[in-house]
Image (cartoon, helix red, strand yellow):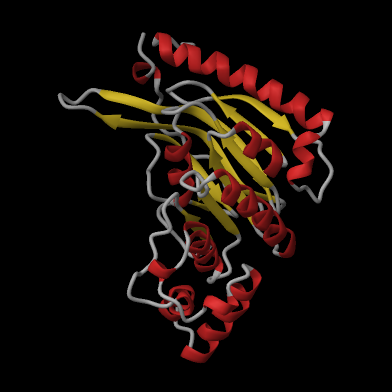
Amino acid sequence: MSIISMIRKPVPVPLREAGEVEIDVRDVTIAFERDGGELVPAVDRVSFQVRRGEFICLLGPSGCGKSTLLNAVAGFETPYEGEVVVGTKVVTGPGPDRGVVFQQPRLFPWKSVRANVAHGPRMAGKSRADAGAIADELIEMVGLSRSAKALPHTLSGGMQQRVAIARALANRPNILLMDEPFGALDAQTRTVMQESLLRLWAQLDTTILFVTHDIDEAVLLADRVLVMSAGPGRIVRDLAVDLPRPRTIETTLGARFQALRRECLDLIRQQSQKAFEGTHDA
């Protein structure tokens, strides 16, 4: 029996009372239609919770549905079954409570760094002065005050991504959703960006859900790593990362980091082998 044939019709779930859970993914299945009308699941019956202020990484082999799941939390994808609850509301579309950072910065090329960051607050009705003050604060936090008047094309890839992060934070979202934001950067820049993100997260009361295929990145950044299976994506391990904070690149040299890395590596190797062989758990 196929996975889709076993999918039940959605059953409404009562909303939880306001509490510590920021993101509640409830039995979510996401499927896409192929030519001919066949439904193919990308994510299959996934459930997990993220508490306020947590840094959670979604880790898995290519094609396992990590980005699709993130898009459902962002409100860009609608589950075929199940629901995503943010705060006390079922997600029905994008909202200012969730900032999103993509792999490519997607900045407005004709706007300065300051204008890019101020864009969200301006669209939300802030005055020019108030939006500018918000932009200035965030630009300083990401270390780009000297480049506030620069256009994006004059910046390095890492600097552009810092602008994208500042822009995503400009509307003061409760949640920052990050889809392989450092995947296009060189190794040295990526390390700098990881440490910069950890410092920024430590300063802000923000929950982060971060998609990556890089095991070292996931273990370095996260409070918990949710390891996903080969497609259709399921959570095969919810791994607590018990490394002390603050963390830097030196953290990766420790014995505990290496043990957690090996555990993730073994899981990913198993799932990648299943994807290569075209098999999965039914």
Nearer to the camera, 50 or 152: 152
Residue at the spot 56% in from the left edge and 13% down from the top edge:
270
Q: Can residue 14 be seen in this snapshot?
A: no
Nearer to the camera, 174 or 170: 170
Residue at the spot 45% in from the left edge and 40% down from the top edge:
67
Residue 52: image x %, image y %? Answer: 69, 53
Nearer to the camera, 192 or 133: 192
Residue at the spot 74% in from the left edge and 27% down from the top edge:
260
Left or right of 247 in this view: 274: left
Left or right of 231 in this view: 211: right
Q: Quadrant of residue 41?
A: top left
Residue 195: image x %, image y %? Answer: 69, 53
Residue at the spot 82% in from the left edge and 48% down from the top edge:
245
**Please, is residue 122 above or below residue 180 in the view?**
below
Residue 8: image x %, image y %? Answer: 41, 24
Left or right of 246 in this view: 215: left
Residue 207: image x %, image y %? Answer: 64, 54
> Which quadrant holds the N terminus?
top left
Nearer to the camera, 95 or 228: 228
Q: Quadrant of residue 64?
A: top left
Count of all numbered marks drawn on residues in the image: 0
Q: Can residue 9 be seen in this snapshot?
A: yes
